[in-house]
């Protein structure tokens, strides 16, 4: 669990958007309903890039398997909140 205050949904969405643009070359707009794997073309390397960036920026650690069942940005945000201890 992180010592930093948890970001709200808007901040999480903005962070995921920023990482998608800067690290994954995505140029569209993400919403909570965006199907993240398809839209960001997340293969194992791109997923790892996204996860590592999120862990570093949010100062948390995701466990293996946390990504199981995550299909939308909203589901990813729920995992991040849960790992931050606020979900």
Image (cartoon, grey):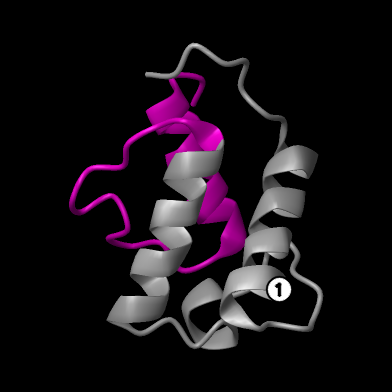
Question: Residue at 34% across / 66% down in the picture?
Answer: 48
- The answer to whether 1 is drawn above or below residue 71 in the figure is above
Residue in the picture at 27% in, 60% down: 68
**18 lies left or right of 41:** right
Specify the segment rendered in magenta: 58-87
Residue 32 seen from this side: no
- Of 44 and 86, nearer the camera is 44
Quarter of the figure with residue 36? bottom right
Seen at 22% across and 43% down, the residue is 63
Q: Residue 27: horizontal and vertical position, in percent?
A: 78, 83
Q: Is 26 inside the magenta-drawn segment?
A: no
Residue 14 appears in the picture as rendered: yes
- Relative to 40, does residue 7 appear above or below in the rendering? above
Percent position of residue 41, x then y? 49, 88
Q: Which residue is drawn at 47% across and 78% down?
A: 37
- Residue 69 pos. (x, y %): 33, 62
Locate the N terminus and report the quarter of the image it occupies. top left
Count up the numbered dots: 1
- Most distant residue in the top direction: 3
Residue 16, x across and y down, in percent: 64, 57
Image-based side of 11 in relation to 84, left or right: right
Element at badge 1?
Answer: helix
Q: Residue furthest left?
A: 64
Relative vertical location of residue 3 with respect to residue 74 in this rendering, above or below: above
Judging by the rendered image, the residue that carries numbered circle 1 is: 21
**Residue 69 among magenta residues:** yes
Q: Quadrant of residue 20?
A: bottom right
């Amino acid at each position: 669990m992180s010592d930093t205050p948890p970001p709200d949904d808007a901040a999480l969405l903005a962070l995921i958007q920023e990482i998608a643009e800067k690290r994954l070359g995505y140029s569209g707009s993400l919403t909570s309903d965006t199907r993240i794997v398809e839209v960001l073309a997340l293969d194992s390397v791109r997923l790892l890039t996204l996860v590592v960036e999120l862990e570093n920026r949010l100062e948390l650690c995701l466990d293996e398997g946390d990504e199981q069942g995550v299909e939308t940005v909203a589901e990813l945000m729920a995992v991040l909140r849960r790992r931050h201890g606020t979900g």
